[in-house]
Image (tube, grey):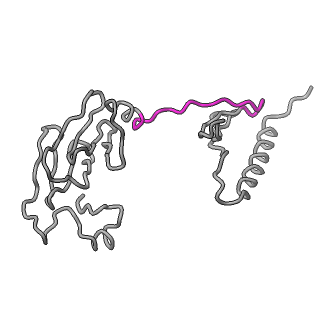
């Protein structure tokens, strides 16, 4: 029996996938995409995204010769591993920050800043006062955190465990590191959340 050359099989698969993608493109708008080809793992296996029986997205690897497919376990990212290592009862909220190196998390609790370092068991309290720290940002090396408090600009050095006040002239008319509404809206953009420091 004569075997079909692999090139012809690839062409057939390409035609089938092109036809499949065209049918997906013609589906009514508003219906979520359920299946999508995500790439090749080798010369005979391609990956696709679909939904499992519970409606959760999964990635599967399919063999082009047999048509059989298997689930591919999702590899956990550094972010996932850091979040999993948080102390019991702690979750990552919308205002919490992860350091650029994915080794620490800055949490805002009780109107103060707390830090969690991957590998440790507890949160470390950084600030302890009535004033609210806003617009916290990690430095690029992840060793310092900048924020504004009472209209002044501060830096917390995570290595020396020390809060450093950078400005002292805040008033009703002077905002250090915190923009007024007009600057946020018209110049810095809403994504800045009023932060006016880099």
Q: Position of residue 140 (x, y in %)?
A: 27, 47
Indicate the quadrant where residue 50 lies: top right
Report the side of 57 relative to 119 (left or right): right
- 150 drawn magenta: no
Relative to 86, residue 186 above or below: below
Q: Position of residue 190 (x, y in %)?
A: 35, 65
Quadrant for the N terminus, please.
top right
Report the side of 148 relative to 56 (left or right): left
Q: Position of residue 188 (x, y in %)?
A: 31, 67
Q: How many marks?
A: 0
The overriding secondary structure of the stretch rendered in magenta is loop
Instruction: Give the camera-side residue of 112 and 57.
Output: 112
Instruction: Give the camera-side residue of 63 and 110.
Output: 110
Q: Position of residue 10 (x, y in %)?
A: 76, 40
- Kindly give the residue lying farthest to the right in the view shown: 1
Residue at the image point whose x is 25% and y is 44% from the top = 109
Residue at the image point whose x is 32% and y is 43% from the top = 98
Quadrant for the C terminus, please.
bottom left
Residue at the image point whose x is 33% and y is 71% from the top = 185
Residue at the image point whose x is 31% and y is 61% from the top = 193
Relative to 65, residue 165 above or below: below
Region of the chain picked out in magenta, as a range: 63-80
Indicate the quadrant where residue 43 lies: top right
């Amino acid at each position: 029996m004569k075997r079909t050359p692999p090139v012809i099989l690839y062409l057939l698969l390409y035609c089938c996938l092109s036809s499949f993608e065209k049918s997906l493109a013609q589906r009514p708008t508003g219906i979520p995409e359920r299946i999508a080809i995500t790439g090749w793992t080798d010369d005979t296996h391609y990956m696709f995204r679909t939904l499992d029986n519970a409606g959760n997205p999964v990635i599967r690897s399919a063999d082009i010769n047999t048509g059989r497919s298997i689930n591919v376990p999702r590899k956990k990212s550094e972010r996932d591993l850091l979040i999993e290592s948080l102390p019991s009862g702690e979750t990552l909220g919308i205002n919490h920050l992860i350091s650029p190196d994915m080794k620490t998390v800055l949490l805002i609790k009780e109107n103060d800043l707390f830090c969690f370092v991957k590998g440790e068991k507890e949160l470390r309290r950084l600030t302890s006062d009535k004033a609210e720290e806003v617009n916290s940002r990690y430095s690029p090396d992840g060793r310092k955190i900048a924020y504004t408090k009472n209209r002044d600009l501060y830096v917390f050095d995570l290595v020396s465990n020390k809060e450093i006040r950078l400005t002292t002239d805040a008033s009703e008319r002077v905002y250090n590191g915190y923009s007024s509404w007009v600057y946020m809206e018209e110049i810095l953009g809403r994504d800045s959340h009023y932060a006016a420091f880099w």
